[in-house]
Amino acid sequence: MIYVHGYPGSGTRWAARVLCGGKETFVQEPFDRDKNGGLLAGYYPDRMEHAAKVLERTMRGLPPGTHMVKEEFAVPYQLRLLREDHRQVYIRRDTLGNVAFLRQWKSLDNWLWYFEGLVKEAGEWASDVWPEDAAFDNVPCLLAIAHEFQLKHDLAAARECGVEVVRYEHLCNNWEDEYGGLCDVLRLDYTTAIREYAGLTHEAPVFPLDEQTTSWVQEIVRRAQND
C-alpha cells in the first residue's frame, strides 16, 4: 500500500489525486484524530503504544482493496510503525504558503483546536519562536508555529525511516520531472493519466498575505530552523 503523508494544507490531497490519475480513489485520514484523545501531536516515544493500537485498528477498518492512503495526522508515529512493504512519501510545503492556504480554508474555525493543540504541545519552544511584537492570539502566527513544530517531528521521522521528502513547490514548478521521480520512489508506473492531470492542475493557488504577517511568518521560520 502507498502512504502519502503530509501536514494539513500541504498539498497531500492534490498529490495523491495526481498519483491516482486524477481520480480520488484513495482513503483520506483514516487515522483516529478525535479531538478528545487522538491528537498525538509532535512525537513522544511514550505515546507509541497508543499510536500502534490506533494504527492497527485503522488498518483493519480500511475498505477492501485500498491501495493508497493520504494521511496528515500522527505522521511521525505512522512513519515508524508502518511495515517495510508500505511505500511512503512525505509532502512538505513552505510555511508561508501553508499559512496563506489555511487562512482562507473554509473549515479553519472548526479546526483551530488542532493547531492550538500543537502550539500547546510545543510549550516553551513555541514561546521562543513567537515574534515579540505579535499578539499571542494572532492566528497566522499560531498556524506558522504549529506547522514548524509538527514539521520538526515529521522531518526527523522521515530521516530516521528513510522516507523521501518531496516539496510541494517543486511538484508545482517542475511537475513532469518531480512526479516522474515520485513514481519511481513509490514504484508506480508514470502513466499518461498522471502526466495529463498533473499538467492541468500543477499551478499553486495564490493567497497573498499582508506585509506584517509575511514578516512574522518569516521570522518564525528563521527561529524554528527546520532547514
Image (spheres, grey):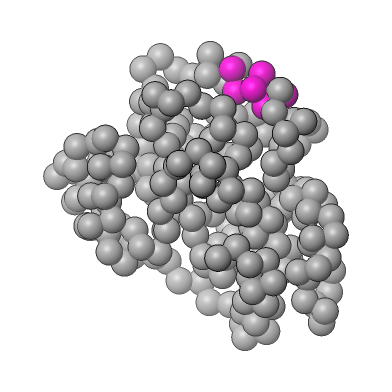
Can you say which quadrant of the picture contains the N terminus?
top left
Out of 210 and 126, give the one closest to the viewer.
126
Out of 56 and 29, give the one closest to the viewer.
56
Give the x, y percent position of residue 166: 40, 53
Out of 39 and 110, give the one closest to the viewer.
39
- Kindly identify the residue that appears in the image at 78 percent across and 70 percent down: 130
Residue 110 visible to the viewer: no
> Which SS does the magenta portion mostly show?
helix
Residue 21 vertical position relative to residue 123 in the rendered view, above or below:
above
Residue 226 vertical position relative to residue 56 in the rendered view, above or below:
below
From this viewpoint, which residue is outermost toward the bottom?
211
Give the x, y percent position of residue 129: 76, 69
Stretch in magenta: 50-56
Q: Is residue 39 left or right of residue 76?
A: right
Q: Is residue 199 left or right of residue 13?
A: left
- Kindly identify the residue that appears in the image at 40 percent across and 64 percent down: 169
Residue 95, quarter of picture? bottom right
Residue 151 vertical position relative to residue 54 in the rendered view, above or below:
below
Residue 1 visible to the viewer: yes
Answer whether residue 51 is magenta in the image.
yes
Give the x, y percent position of residue 22: 28, 43
- Kindly identify the residue that appears in the image at 49 percent across and 60 percent down: 93
Answer whether residue 82 is magenta in the image.
no
- Kindly identify the residue that appears in the image at 74 percent across and 50 percent down: 118
Residue 35 vertical position relative to residue 170 in the rendered view, above or below:
above
From this viewpoint, which residue is outermost toward the left?
192
